[in-house]
Image (cartoon, coloured by chain):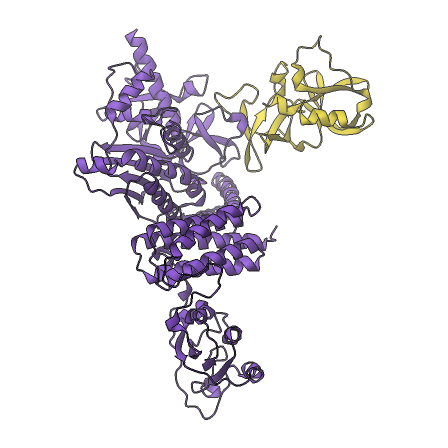
């Protein structure tokens, strides 16, 4: 449907994708490493009154004021207090053909790793309370299911 | 990053030349006899032709050549620059511009049509010149067997990069010529300035070319030389081979012992080249450097970051006890402030560059609508941030169109109203404190308040018979889709526009005001901040959050007295006898907990409306570097942007106009619930 999905389909089945593995609640998400600009420690954030629930605040990252998104809200997960493992992953997205930096809160950042497309699972239509459009695909990594999210969709 | 496309430079240069050309042509409408203007237009054309050919814009060069040839007759004063001719010339200018900007998509047929039109004007001239003949608009009286020329260059001509020898070479191309250098003026060796030109030449030219062709050779140095041309009945020119040798041999400044030292050359004020351009350019005799706009933007960004870093340093220094660090922090604060001012100054552009564009618009509109209009501009040297100038173009086009289309009546109505036939539109820019006011004033019929009201009622925007001030009624003009024009013309009356104008101006953190006197005219005034990048702000605290209010909007700060907050239903404040509605920022920002005991109210105003904002604390002034909010927050209207505070956290900037609108909505709702 989207260019990215076509690209996904066109890519060879044995292709490995570099990802940054993050933890949100009980789930593991794999963010395309190409999107990730940097990973920073939590910084003080500024609440934006009246903003959409999943982008409740803004932060200062190297002199730029960027929105801080909370994917947990998009995936209906409980929002927990920041812990020692909490990080902000700064990703760059194209929104309406303009690059935009967004911070994403992660409960934990595991590692930069590679996932293989051979293990891609068909996104199940039932048994999932997440909107299917938020998910590019689900794959297996070290015998665990990980979600590769569609960040453009999630942040729109 | 620094590689610059030479054709890009040509485009930029051509852009400026087009402005000169257009200004000259439009001035010619008013002063058809002004030779200077004709020359100025001609020179611009010639430069476009020359550099166009140099950068490979062959189509441009070819067309401009034809255009120039046709225009030659005007230059020689044989035909008058009539209104119609100038219209065609303007069209030709547009066509050349199109050729430069998008050569491939520009249809050559248009060019041919324009040339045909041009020929129409030129054919009736006595001599009748085909446009294809090059330097041939020959006048019989000027035809001679040859020419005797006397060339005297200003002594500084070599420093300006002109070479007399090259000019002599060009002269040779017209026909065989014999040049004799006159060395009288060459001083003694110890007084000789190696970079001055002391030589004069007597040239005998055996060619039946026109005197204009000779003028053309010297076109670019005419201001810096004396050229005497006299026709010769018959010429004795030595055989060409000899002359070919003579010229290269003619030694440049050679000292000769026999010559009396004599002061040479009148030293003219240096940049003579720009003499014919409009006045505003004339005043700027200072050296200028061309800088790409993006680099200025980058510089501004860096300065913004510096100001933020400096604020953090200052905070650190104030909290610490090290005196020497405090001194350095103060020093850096001072430097950062002056660097900021300088950088902002570098981004300032006189608004005149924008005004120039509208003369053409008015010219075309007044012709199309058959409403003669006198267009007057003032305050061209008022400076504004360059990004603002770019943003202002479209709104002003719209306002001027409206003024001509709706404001100015047609000739019959003007006559009936006892007004001069020619309408008048004034475009004015003035500084007013930290703001710039740009106004468009017409002396037309004024706004028809009754009609606007009827339309608003018809569209269901107000209840019939509702009590509204005239000013409130006029505000409906800014309502999306609101138009009172009875017929939709190509220009206006579609109801899109004024709302867009308003939005654009508000996006620039400006405001728009309407004033009208029935039968006398309408004035639309745009109030704009000087710059978009940095503003003076008032830092306030609401709960834990800190916010910035643009200082230009702040009128007053008062404490909220217990009486004022006594009842929750009555959100009005008594400010020196005036009732001012107020908004509790704590409620708007969803702050929980108990408010501070002494609540402060900041009175802000936009135009005539005043609103109080209730905050917990007023922290103080803050140099605010404006960062825009991302698309993800574009739905949040009460903030116009964000900035970074001294401690590195982000603070949001309140959008004053939105807050006022919100306050009005609140009180209207209250009125309604009271009524119900």
Identify the residue at the far bottom of this view: B258
> In this view of the protein, which residue sits in the foreground, A112 or B602?
A112
> From this viewpoint, is residue A31 visible?
yes
Give how far across and how far down residue B320 sits, in percent.
50, 40
Give how far across and how far down residue B172 sits, in percent.
52, 76
Chain coloured yellow in this rendering:
A
Chain coloured purple in this rendering:
B
Give how far across and how far down residue B184 sits, in percent.
43, 87
Residue under the point 45% across and 28% down: B639
Identify the residue at the far left of this view: B418
Examine the rendered structure and indicate whether residue B77 appears above or below residue B477: below
Examine the rendered structure and indicate whether residue B322 appears above or below residue B593: below
Examine the rendered structure and indicate whether residue B169 appears above or below residue B566: below
Identify the residue at the far top of this view: B676
> In this view of the protein, which residue sits in the foreground, A57 or B461?
B461
> In this view of the protein, which residue sits in the foreground, B563 or A147?
A147
Report the side of A137 relative to B260 (left or right). right
> From this viewpoint, is residue B561 visible?
no
């Amino acid at each position: 449907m989207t260019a990215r999905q076509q690209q996904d389909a066109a890519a060879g089945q044995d292709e490995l994708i570099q990802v940054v593995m993050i933890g949100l609640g009980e789930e593991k998400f794999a963010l395309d490493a190409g999107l990730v600009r940097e990973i920073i420690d939590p910084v003080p954030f500024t609440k934006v009154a009246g903003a959409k629930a999943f982008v409740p605040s803004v932060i200062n990252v190297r002199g730029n004021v960027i929105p801080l998104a909370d994917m947990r809200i998009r995936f209906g997960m409980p929002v927990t207090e920041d812990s020692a493992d909490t990080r902000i992953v700064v990703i760059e997205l194209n929104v309406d053909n303009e690059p935009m930096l967004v911070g994403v809160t992660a409960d934990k950042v595991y590692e930069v790793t590679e996932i293989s497309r051979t293990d891609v699972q068909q996104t199940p239509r039932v048994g999932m309370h997440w909107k299917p459009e938020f998910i590019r695909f689900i794959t297996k990594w070290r015998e665990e299911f990980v979600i590769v999210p569609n960040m453009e969709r999630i942040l729109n | 990053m620094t590689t610059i496309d030479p054709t890009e430079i040509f485009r930029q240069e051509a852009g400026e030349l087009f402005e000169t050309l257009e200004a000259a042509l439009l001035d010619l409408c008013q002063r058809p006899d002004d030779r200077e203007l004709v020359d100025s237009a001609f020179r611009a054309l010639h430069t476009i032709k020359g550099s166009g050919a140099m950068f490979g814009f062959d189509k441009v060069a070819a067309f401009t050549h034809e255009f120039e040839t046709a225009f030659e007759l005007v230059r020689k004063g044989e035909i008058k620059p009539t209104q119609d001719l100038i219209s065609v010339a303007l069209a030709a200018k547009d066509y050349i511009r199109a050729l430069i900007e998008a050569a491939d998509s520009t249809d050559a047929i248009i060019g041919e049509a324009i040339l045909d039109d041009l020929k129409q004007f030129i054919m009736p001239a006595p001599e009748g010149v085909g446009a294809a003949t090059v330097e041939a608009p020959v006048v019989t009286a000027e035809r001679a067997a040859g020419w005797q020329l006397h060339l005297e260059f200003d002594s500084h001509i070599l420093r300006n990069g002109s070479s007399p020898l090259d000019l002599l070479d060009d002269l040779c191309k017209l026909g065989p010529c014999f040049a004799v250098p006159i060395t009288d003026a060459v001083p003694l060796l110890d007084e000789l300035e190696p970079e001055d030109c002391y030589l004069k030449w007597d040239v005998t030219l055996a060619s039946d070319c026109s005197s204009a062709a000779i003028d053309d050779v010297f076109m670019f140095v005419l201001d810096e030389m004396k050229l005497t041309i006299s026709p010769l009945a018959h010429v004795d020119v030595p055989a060409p081979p000899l002359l070919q040798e003579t010229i290269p041999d003619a030694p440049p400044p050679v000292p000769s012992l026999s010559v009396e030292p004599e002061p040479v050359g009148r030293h003219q004020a240096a940049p003579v080249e720009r003499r014919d351009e409009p006045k505003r350019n004339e005043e700027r005799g200072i050296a200028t450097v061309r800088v790409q706009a993006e680099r200025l933007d980058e510089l501004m960004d860096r300065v913004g970051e510096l100001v933020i870093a400096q604020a953090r340093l200052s905070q650190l220094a104030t909290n610490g006890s090290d005196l020497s660090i405090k001194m350095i922090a103060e020093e850096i604060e001072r430097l950062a402030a002056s660097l900021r001012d300088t950088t902002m100054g570098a981004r300032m552009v006189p608004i005149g560059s924008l005004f120039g564009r509208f003369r053409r618009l008015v010219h075309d509109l007044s012709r199309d609508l058959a409403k003669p209009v006198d267009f007057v501009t003032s305050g061209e040297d008022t400076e504004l941030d360059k990004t603002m100038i770019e943003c202002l173009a479209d709104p002003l086009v719209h306002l001027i169109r409206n003024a001509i289309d709706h404001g100015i009546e047609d000739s019959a109505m003007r006559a009936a109203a006892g007004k001069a036939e020619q309408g008048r539109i004034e475009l004015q820019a003035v500084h007013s404190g930290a703001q710039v006011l740009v106004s468009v004033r017409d002396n037309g019929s004024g706004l028809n308040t009754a009609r606007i009201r009827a339309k608003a009622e018809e569209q269901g925007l107000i209840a019939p018979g509702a009590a509204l001030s005239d000013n409130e009624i006029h505000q409906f003009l800014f309502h999306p889709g609101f138009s009172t024009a009875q017929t939709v013309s190509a220009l206006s009356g579609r109801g899109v526009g004024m709302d867009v104008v308003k939005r654009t101006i508000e996006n620039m953190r400006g405001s728009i005001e309407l004033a009208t006197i029935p039968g006398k005219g309408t004035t639309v005034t745009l109030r704009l901040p000087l710059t978009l990048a940095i503003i003076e702000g008032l830092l306030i605290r609401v709960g834990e959050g800190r916010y910035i209010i643009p200082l230009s909007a702040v009128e007053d700060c008062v404490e909220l007295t217990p009486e004022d907050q006594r009842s929750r239903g009555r959100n009005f404040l008594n400010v020196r006898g005036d009732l001012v509605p107020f908004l509790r920022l704590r409620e708007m920002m969803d702050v929980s907990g108990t408010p501070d005991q002494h609540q402060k109210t900041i009175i802000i105003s936009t135009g005539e409306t005043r609103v109080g904002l209730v905050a917990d604390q007023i922290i103080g002034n803050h140099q605010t570097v404006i960062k825009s909010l991302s698309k993800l927050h574009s739905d949040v209207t009460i903030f116009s942007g964000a900035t970074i505070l001294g401690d590195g956290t982000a603070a949001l900037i309140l959008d004053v106009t939105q807050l006022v609108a919100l306050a009005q909505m609140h009180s209207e709702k209250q009125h309604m619930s009271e009524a119900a």
